[in-house]
Structure formats: structure tokens, C-alpha cells
Image (spheres, grey):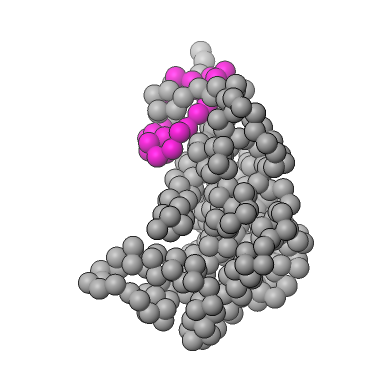
């Protein structure tokens, strides 16, 4: 009799030669899913594969199920792995690794000013500042202003006319969604920063996965929102190339969130640690935390796939805004 066990999946991000997100690699480890003919999350995986090129490690025991879901075996000859920004070999079609987490190049004056304004907006929204204060800062950054109005108009919201006022846009979007959007915009494409597209993808997955994990663990809606923000804030130090504590110092964030991202304290800190274990391909450590949260591996796999699907929507929106 063949025994089966639920593999704990990790998903790697692949960039193309232009440093943009171009593919995903689904990995359950060398023994993951041994004997499994079907995957409980196969339908979700098929939807993901319909949106972006998805690959699997060729020697995985789940090969048959992954092929059925629309994935292709990874050709390692077309892949270059790097943890630093480096030139590509001629045959490389994809870049793997954490190269986009390397320290940033010194930003241009305009780039630094734009991110400083975005961070100032995050601070104002986090502190629940008056709409007029938020609007005044938005007016100083044409790119952010354009992206906000484009977002609100693209959502429809049942409106019969275009929204052109910042105050209207802020009211329609709501403070919680505005805060979430501003954090995503911090990571979106910036001139002369080759890391930004992949950083946006990474932070979007991390934040959404933490939010979904919080939900699966039985936390309330408010805690789920804070879990999302914890995932977002955890990579701000990488974005700015400075200590995270220094980046967060001017922001009026909760003590729980601050202790989570700086010291891995509390429930939020443990959720962040869980996602980082998955990102680093440490399944034993991740599985132990999932047991503490009473979240089955299969449920986690499904929410991780869902988080990547959500991220693809964020990336598409970012590219559309940048090209419009």
C-alpha cells in the first residue's frame, strides 16, 4: 500500500531579462507528495498557470498532477540563479534567487523625493490625518496622483462618471484600502531601480499570505488587516536600503506591528516568521508553526497559491499604470 502525505509547497519568483516578473516555480521538495495522483488545490493551481508561466522541478513525485494542472518542467539551462544584481549569461531566459533583496543603488534626487512623499502619505494615513492633509501631499507627486485616480476609476464602484477629485477618490476608496494601496505603490516601479518590479511581487505575496494565514488561524478582520500591513512593512528596510527601525521611526504604527517586524514578537511576529520559513524553503520549521496555528498543510498550500494569484493582479495594475 502506498502511503501519501501532504507536501508543504513553496513558490519561487522568476524574472525575465528585463528584471520583470515572468514565471513561478512550484516546489514541494524532493519527496513532497509521494504517491499523490491528484492535488486538492489543483484547480487553483490551474488558474494560476493560466495567468503566468508556471514550472515544477522535473524530478518531483507530483509530476503527473502538476502537468495536468498546466505546469511545465523547469529547464535549468535557461535559468540563472543570483543573489546579487549581475549581468546575465546569453542563454538565460529567467533569473531566480534573491538578487532583488540586495541593497539598492543610490537613488536619484527625483526617485528619493518620490519615495519620501509616498512614505509621508503612509504616515499620514496611518495616523488617520485629515483628508486635506493627505490631498496636499498627493498634489506634490503627479505619478502617485495619477495612479490613485486611475485605480479608483478602474474599480468602477458603480459610478456613472469619472472621479477627478483627490478627496472623492480617498472617500470612495476608504482609509483601509488607501493605506494598503499606498504601501504597494511604495514598491512599484521606479526609474533606475532594477529591483522594484520583483520587490513589489515579493511584498504583495508576503502581505497577502500573512493576511490569509491570519484568517485561517481564526483571527478577526482587524487582525487580518494588521497582518497584511506587517508583511508590507517588513520589507521597507530592503526598499530604502536602511535599517527597518529607522524607516519605521516616523510612522505611528501599533506596538504589536512594530515588535512583530523588528523582533518577531507576538502572533504577528510568528506569522511573519512562518512566511519567511516558506520563502527560505525551510518546510520543517514552517510545518511546526502551522501545527501551532492549527492550519493544515493543504489549506496553507491553497492560500499560498491564492496569494500569488492576488499578487499577479497587483503586478498587472502596476504595469498598466506605468505604461498608460
Q: Quadrant of residue 47?
A: top left
Vertical arrangement, residue 215 with respect to residue 138, above or below: above
Q: Residue 239 vs residue 310: left or right?
A: right
In the rendered image, residue 52 lying in the magenta stretch gets the answer: yes
Residue 127 in view of the camera: yes
Q: Give the range drawn in magenta.
A: 41-65
- At a point 69% along the width and 42% down the height, the residue shown is 85
Q: In which quarter of the image is residue 262?
A: bottom right
- Where does the C terminus fall, quadrant-wise? bottom left
Residue 153 drawn at (x, y percent): 33, 67
Vertical arrangement, residue 169 with respect to residue 270, above or below: below
Q: In this orientation, which residue lies closer to the viewer: 40 or 253?
A: 253
Residue 223 in view of the camera: no
In the rendered image, residue 270 lying in the magenta stretch gets the answer: no
Residue 185 drawn at (x, y percent): 53, 62
**Residue that protrudes farthest toward the left in the picture:** 160
Q: Residue 4 vs residue 161: left or right?
A: right
**Residue that protrudes farthest toward the top in the picture:** 1
- At a point 55% along the width and 22% down the height, the residue shown is 75
Residue 63 drawn at (x, y percent): 49, 20
- At a point 68% along the width and 48% down the height, the residue shown is 101
Amino acid at each position: 500500500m502506498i502511503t501519501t502525505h501532504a507536501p508543504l509547497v513553496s513558490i519561487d519568483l522568476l524574472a525575465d531579462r528585463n528584471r520583470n516578473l515572468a514565471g513561478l516555480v512550484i516546489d514541494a521538495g524532493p519527496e513532497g507528495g509521494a504517491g499523490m495522483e491528484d492535488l486538492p488545490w489543483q484547480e487553483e493551481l490551474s488558474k494560476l498557470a493560466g495567468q503566468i508561466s508556471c514550472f515544477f522541478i522535473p524530478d518531483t513525485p507530483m509530476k503527473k498532477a502538476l502537468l495536468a494542472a498546466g505546469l511545465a518542467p523547469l529547464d535549468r539551462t535557461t535559468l540563472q540563479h543570483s543573489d546579487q544584481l549581475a549581468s546575465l549569461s546569453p542563454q538565460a531566459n529567467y533569473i531566480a534567487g534573491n538578487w532583488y533583496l540586495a541593497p539598492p543603488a543610490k537613488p536619484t534626487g527625483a526617485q528619493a523625493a518620490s519615495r519620501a512623499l509616498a512614505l509621508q502619505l503612509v504616515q499620514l494615513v496611518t495616523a488617520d490625518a485629515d483628508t486635506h492633509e493627505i490631498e496636499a501631499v498627493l498634489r506634490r507627486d503627479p505619478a502617485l496622483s495619477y495612479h490613485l485616480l486611475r485605480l479608483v476609476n478602474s474599480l468602477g464602484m458603480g459610478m456613472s462618471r469619472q472621479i477627478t477629485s483627490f478627496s472623492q477618490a480617498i472617500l470612495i476608496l476608504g482609509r483601509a484600502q488607501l493605506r494598503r494601496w499606498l504601501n504597494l505603490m511604495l514598491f512599484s516601479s521606479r526609474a533606475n531601480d532594477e529591483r522594484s518590479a520583483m520587490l513589489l511581487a515579493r511584498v504583495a505575496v508576503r502581505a497577502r499570505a500573512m493576511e490569509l494565514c491570519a484568517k485561517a488561524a481564526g483571527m478577526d478582520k482587524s487582525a487580518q488587516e494588521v497582518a497584511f500591513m506587517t508583511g508590507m512593512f517588513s520589507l521597507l528596510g530592503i526598499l530604502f536600503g536602511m535599517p527597518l527601525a529607522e524607516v519605521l521611526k516616523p510612522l505611528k504604527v501599533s506596538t504589536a506591528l512594530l515588535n512583530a517586524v523588528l523582533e518577531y514578537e507576538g502572533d504577528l511576529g510568528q506569522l511573519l516568521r512562518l512566511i519567511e520559513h516558506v520563502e527560505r524553503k525551510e518546510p520543517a520549521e514552517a510545518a511546526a508553526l502551522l501545527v501551532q496555528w492549527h492550519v493544515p498543510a493543504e489549506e496553507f498550500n491553497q492560500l499560498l497559491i491564492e496569494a500569488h494569484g492576488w499578487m499577479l493582479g497587483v503586478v498587472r495594475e502596476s504595469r498598466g499604470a506605468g505604461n498608460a
